[in-house]
Image (cartoon, rainbow, N blue to C red):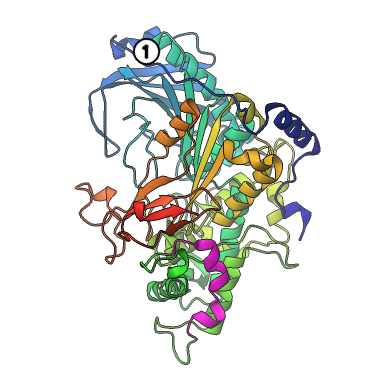
């Protein structure tokens, strides 16, 4: 394997500092932080536009009162909404105006805590600062009384990746927006309530989960608790792997595409038709694959309940060659051709260059392969301008592509050279002084000394059926933490696999859970979360359509619950009790 594509090694100096620090604090002597103290704001929210001043590089653009009611499908209290922007500038590279846009929502009745809402995708828009939590949100940070901040991460283009032409916008997106906004937000909160937040938290999923692990590494002394979901901390590698997948699927596609779409939405005719990768594995074929995984692995957690709870054991039990029927004739959804089996195995074993060097981690076989989200990430997002092809070409490649008018996603993915183009995510050039693997990833993924010194805690959750950010890659990160901190790891870092869950939510999973309350309890009271209860959200569990997961199997109770267990323990059936109740399972 090429060293350039191995996970980054722990720097010897940082490791030495970590070990010295660890020896100094001892495994049972981590700092214990005190509980936050609530406060109220009884003034007029509209006056905050003029009364908030002195924040470096910051302009407050508006403030208003928002009454109690539904926000992002969650009931939230009356609060002030403050919007603004930081560090406005004109790029000397592309001539565009950039700034770090944000909004802060400040409850009239405040719990004394700050929550930085790390958003997903390529950012580019200020999402509603509700602080939604878990896969299918059951509550939010704002609903709990947190002051919540959301930002666009330093650029104003949510659907296109062309901000990657500006080197500062790249860095703001990667890590600097968090570093700039965090102290500003704390100062803003102090101006409103008369005191700074007693405790500060950050959370997000997908790219927001990446933000979380980057913050844990770079800004671990600024936060008391960090919650990371599906943390694509090797995001440039994951994007390259998506393009590699496109070329794999193309070999078994049964149809072609004659057109593609530009970033402006213009449909253009391709000079030569290209494979329609969405035909590589039909919905029926993916459902069949999931059923074979289930048949082989259902009982590994001591219960036969239409659920694969022990995903790690399943990887040893399931075999593509022998457990999936081979087609004797035409594809009909009940079998796979030998070429399809090869592609399926290749995609799960991880992207590679022509010398066999790993470009990204492997993926576990899991029942969520039947999910529409799996197909969307593998076949659609991997070929669209606004996702993996565009992000790779304009944000992660150095130097970036420059033609923003004629760029097409599918031709770029099909023409990507994994020997020549993939190493460019490690490159610097001219004004691009930081590579994508520098500005997008944690400085040193296994060195969390700043967090440890502060007494901060980190909880990470990840769906085992995530089709874009490998669960196995997150396990590799966890193992690197364990290697550095040994038996002390569980004292401040825990990873919670979510069996069957797709990317951040969905799939045949119990994907509705609240990890913020357990994180606060861990940070402020010292009680570690030995498990977190997750519920399915099948038909009838909510009157709000967006909160119902149509992929919950009909053989389950609609609100089936399971404990999410800290890796490497597994929710194992106790031998008696209702199979739909978390209380019938223990983490072992």
What stretch of residues is rendered in magenta? 308-325
With respect to residue 47, does 280 lie above or below?
below
Q: List x then y, in percent, for residue 123.
A: 48, 39
SS state under label 1: helix
- What residue is drawn where x is 41% and y is 74%? 291
Name the spot of residue 72 as percent of width and height, x first.
30, 38
Q: Which residue shows up at 26% across the image and 59% down it?
A: 557
Mark 1: few/some/many CA within 10 Å (<14, 14-19, 20+): some
Would you say residue 157 is visible in this rendering?
no
Q: Residue at x 42, y 16 (%)?
A: 60
Q: Residue at x 44, y 24 (%)?
A: 114
Is residue 312 within the magenta segment?
yes
**In the rendered image, the vertical position of residue 509 relative to residue 210, given as above or below:** below
Query: Per the image, is 189 magenta?
Result: no
Viewer can see residue 558: yes
Residue that sits furthest to the bottom in the current view: 328
The reply, left or right, for residue 485 in relation to residue 118 is right
Nearest the eye: 154 or 320: 320
User: 188 left or right of 210?
Assistant: left
Tell me the chief SS of the magenta region: helix
Where residue 98 appears, as percent x and y from the top left, is: 53, 29
The image position of residue 541, as x and y in percent, is: 23, 51
Please tell me whether residue 159 is drawn above or below residue 42 in the rendered image: below
Q: How many marks?
A: 1
Query: Which residue in the structure is indicated by mark 1?
Result: 49
> If the image is split into quadrants, where does the N terminus sit?
bottom right
């Amino acid at each position: 394997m090429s060293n350039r594509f191995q996970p980054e090694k722990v720097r010897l100096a940082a490791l030495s500092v970590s070990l010295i620090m660890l020896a100094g604090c001892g495994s049972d002597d981590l700092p214990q932080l005190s509980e936050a103290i609530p406060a109220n704001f009884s003034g007029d929210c509209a006056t905050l536009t003029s009364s908030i001043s002195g924040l470096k590089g910051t302009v407050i653009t508006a403030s208003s009162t928002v009454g109690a009611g539904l926000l992002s499908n969650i009931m939230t209290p009356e609060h002030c909404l403050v919007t603004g922007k930081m560090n406005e500038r004109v790029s000397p590279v592309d001539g565009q105006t950039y700034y770090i846009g944000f909004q802060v929502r400040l409850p009239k009745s405040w719990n004394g805590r700050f929550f930085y809402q790390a958003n997903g995708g390529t950012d580019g828009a200020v999402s509603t600062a509700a602080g939604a939590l878990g896969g299918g949100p059951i509550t939010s940070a704002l609903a709990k009384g947190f002051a919540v901040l959301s930002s666009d991460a330093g650029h104003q283009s949510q659907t296109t990746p062309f901000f990657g032409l500006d080197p500062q916008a790249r860095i703001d997106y990667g890590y600097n927006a968090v570093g700039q906004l965090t102290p500003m937000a704390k100062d803003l909160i102090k101006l409103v309530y008369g005191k700074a937040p007693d405790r500060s938290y950050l959370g997000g999923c997908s790219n927001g989960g990446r933000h979380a692990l980057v913050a844990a590494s770079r800004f671990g002394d600024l936060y008391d608790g960090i919650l990371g979901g599906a943390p694509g901390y090797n995001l440039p590698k994951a994007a390259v792997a998506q393009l590699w997948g496109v070329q794999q699927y193309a070999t078994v596609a049964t149809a072609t595409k004659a057109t593609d779409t530009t970033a402006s939405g213009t449909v253009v005719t391709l000079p030569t038709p290209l494979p329609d990768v969405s035909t590589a594995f039909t919905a029926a074929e993916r459902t069949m694959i999931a059923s074979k995984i289930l048949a082989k692995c259902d009982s590994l957690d001591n219960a036969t309940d239409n659920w694969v709870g022990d995903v790690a054991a399943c990887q040893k039990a399931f075999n593509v060659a022998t457990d999936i029927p081979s087609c004797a004739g035409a594809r009909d959804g009940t079998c796979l051709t030998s070429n399809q089996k090869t592609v399926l195995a290749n995609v799960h074993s991880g992207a590679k260059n022509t010398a066999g060097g790993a470009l990204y981690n492997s993926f576990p076989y899991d029942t969520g392969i039947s999910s529409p989200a799996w197909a969307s990430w593998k076949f659609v997002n991997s070929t669209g301008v606004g996702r993996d092809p565009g992000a790779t070409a304009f944000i992660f490649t150095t130097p970036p592509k420059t033609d923003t008018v004629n760029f097409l996603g599918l031709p770029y993915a099909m023409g990507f050279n994994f020997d020549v183009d993939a190493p460019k995510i490690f490159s610097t050039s001219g004004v691009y002084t930081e590579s994508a693997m520098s500005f997008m990833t944690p400085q040193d993924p296994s060195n969390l000394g700043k967090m440890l010194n502060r007494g901060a805690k980190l909880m990470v959750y990840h769906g085992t059926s995530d089709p874009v950010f490998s669960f196995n890659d997150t396990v590799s990160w966890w193992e690197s933490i364990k290697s550095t901190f040994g038996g002390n790891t569980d004292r401040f870092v825990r990873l919670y696999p979510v069996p069957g869950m797709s990317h951040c939510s969905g799939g045949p999973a119990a994907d509705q859970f609240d990890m913020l309350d357990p994180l606060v309890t861990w940070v402020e009271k010292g009680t570690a979360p030995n498990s977190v209860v997750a519920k399915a959200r099948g038909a009838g569990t909510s009157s709000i359509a967006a909160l119902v997961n149509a992929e919950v199997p009909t053989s389950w109770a609609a609100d089936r619950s399971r404990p999410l267990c800290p890796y490497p323990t597994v929710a194992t059936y106790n031998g008696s009790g209702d199979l739909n109740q978390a209380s019938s399972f223990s983490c072992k």
